Image: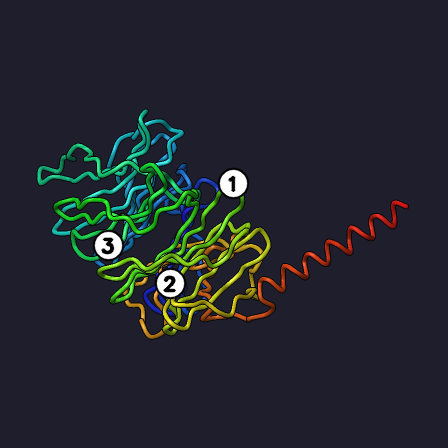
């Protein structure tokens, strides 16, 4: 389910999210959130948002499979006829430059799942889809596209060859070779990234036969540093990474807890592993943050957590509200002792 937060300033925020078959928006008006408006109805849960000429553009798939474009909540325009079976979820990422549109999306066929691109030609007709690569979807997404400039983008995804490899391709007029960042025998169920002037920081959630773990990787211009395991045997559902006040911050969410860990030396080591205590520690979900003018000395982030029941309330952790309590090891020990006491009480009652 897609959730986007478009932030121009603290007083200009638009939330775009899926709810009960609709794409909805809310805006901050005079310091307060306005009424919920419906942008489109009868749609699938996954959609994408991008900005063009200071307007927000929403691309989504109707339940019949056709793709539509809606600008600033105005009348929708069909851009592509039905793509495959109704059961297939297809997410389109789009870019417009010099009055040209290029689409990057997933296209399933009998041989697997592919990333393709398609361009709208000068005669207003669409080119045939061009295959970029095959890929393996994540639990929470298919792939991610980072737009570095006009007609310059980076596509992050995972594939099997034969082990699981996570990497990227650079796409402009040409398509680069696949560049591996991380290889593993685990299945990557979720990931997050953030780009600074000289590095790309990644956090991966890996799922295997013997449990899940969270791994951090930093890629510099000419090398990929050795992966660091942050947590093992976790029941995390997703993860987020951001740079906050020159610190690398990682968060991950379990069914009932929200955890955090911080690096004060840009990923060389991690400290202050702890629990988040705040407004929605038990019902948070990930949202995409679209903010062009992020202040690098304060934070750099592509994703944030929002309450699942009020997806328009952004809270960028840990800028707003982070409290380091017990470490995860201490908290898990407390939970273990509580369970032990509870089991003992049940045995006594049974007698």
Q: Nearer the viewer, residue 168 or 314?
A: 168
Q: Residue 179 appears at what percent x and percent y? A: 24, 48
Disc 1 to disc 3, how far (Cα)? 35 Å
Task: State the quadrant of the N terminus.
Answer: top left
Q: Secondary structure at mark 2?
A: strand
Secondary structure under badge 3? strand
Residue 175 to residue 311: above or below: above
Q: Confirm or deny contact between disc 2 and disc 3 (CB under 8 A).
A: no
Place residue 247 in its image quadrant.
bottom left
Q: Compared to 62, does 196 lie above or below?
A: below
| Residue at position x 22%, y 55% in the image | 52
- Corner quadrant of residue 76: top left
x, y (%) of residue 124? 13, 38
Which callout, 1 or 2, points to the residue nearer the camera?
1
Q: Residue at x 35, y 27 (%)?
A: 85
Gap in Å between the C-alphas at discs 2 and 3? 21 Å
The tag earlier along the polypeptide, 1 or 2, is: 2
Judge the density around disc 2: few (<14), some (14-19), many (≥20) Cα neighbours within 10 Å.
many
Q: Name, please, the residue furthest toward the right.
A: 351
Q: Which one is earlier in the sequence, the residue at label 2 or at label 3? A: 2
The tag on residue 209 is: 1
Q: Nearer the viewer, mark 2 or mark 3?
A: 3
Residue found at the very far left of the displayed protein: 122
Q: Earlier in the sequence, mark 1 or mark 3?
A: 3
Q: Position of residue 271 (x, y in %)?
A: 48, 69
- Label 3, on which residue? 147
Mark carried by residue 13: 2
Q: Name the side, left or right, on which 120 lies relative to 248.
A: left
Question: Which residue is pictured at 9% across the width and 40% down the height?
Answer: 122
Task: Pick the residue in front: 238 or 234.
Answer: 234
Q: Residue furthest front?
A: 226
């Amino acid at each position: 389910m897609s959730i986007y937060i478009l932030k121009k300033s603290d007083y200009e925020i638009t939330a775009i999210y899926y709810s009960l078959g609709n794409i909805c928006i809310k805006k901050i008006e005079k310091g307060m959130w306005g009424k919920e408006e419906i942008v489109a109805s009868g749609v699938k849960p996954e959609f994408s948002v991008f900005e063009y000429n200071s307007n927000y553009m929403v691309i989504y798939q109707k339940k019949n499979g056709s793709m539509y474009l809606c600008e600033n909540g105005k009348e929708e325009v069909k851009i592509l006829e039905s793509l495959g079976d109704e059961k297939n979820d297809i997410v389109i990422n789009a870019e417009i430059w010099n009055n040209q549109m290029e689409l990057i999306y997933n296209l399933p066929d009998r041989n697997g799942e592919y990333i393709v691109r398609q361009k709208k030609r000068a005669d207003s007709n669409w080119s045939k889809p061009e295959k970029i690569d095959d890929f393996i979807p994540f639990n929470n997404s298919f792939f991610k596209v980072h737009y570095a400039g006009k007609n310059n983008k980076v596509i992050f995804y995972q594939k099997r060859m034969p082990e699981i490899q996570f990497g990227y391709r650079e796409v402009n007029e040409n398509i680069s070779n696949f560049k591996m960042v991380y290889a593993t025998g685990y299945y990557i169920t979720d990931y997050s990234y953030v780009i600074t002037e000289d590095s790309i920081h990644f956090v991966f959630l890996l799922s295997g036969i013997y449990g899940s773990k969270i791994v951090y990787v930093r890629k510099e211009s000419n090398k990929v540093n050795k992966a660091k395991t942050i947590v093992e045997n976790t029941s995390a559902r997703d993860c987020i990474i951001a740079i906050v006040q020159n610190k690398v911050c990682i968060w991950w969410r379990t069914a009932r807890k929200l955890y955090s860990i911080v690096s004060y030396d840009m990923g060389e080591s991690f400290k202050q592993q702890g629990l988040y205590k705040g407004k929605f520690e038990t019902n948070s979900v990930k949202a995409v943050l679209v903010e062009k003018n992020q202040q690098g000395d304060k934070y750099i982030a592509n994703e944030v957590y929002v309450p699942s029941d009020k997806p328009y309330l952004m809270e960028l952790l840990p800028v707003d509200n982070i409290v380091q309590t017990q470490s995860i090891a201490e908290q898990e020990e407390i939970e273990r002792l509580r369970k032990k006491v509870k089991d003992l009480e049940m045995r006594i009652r049974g007698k």
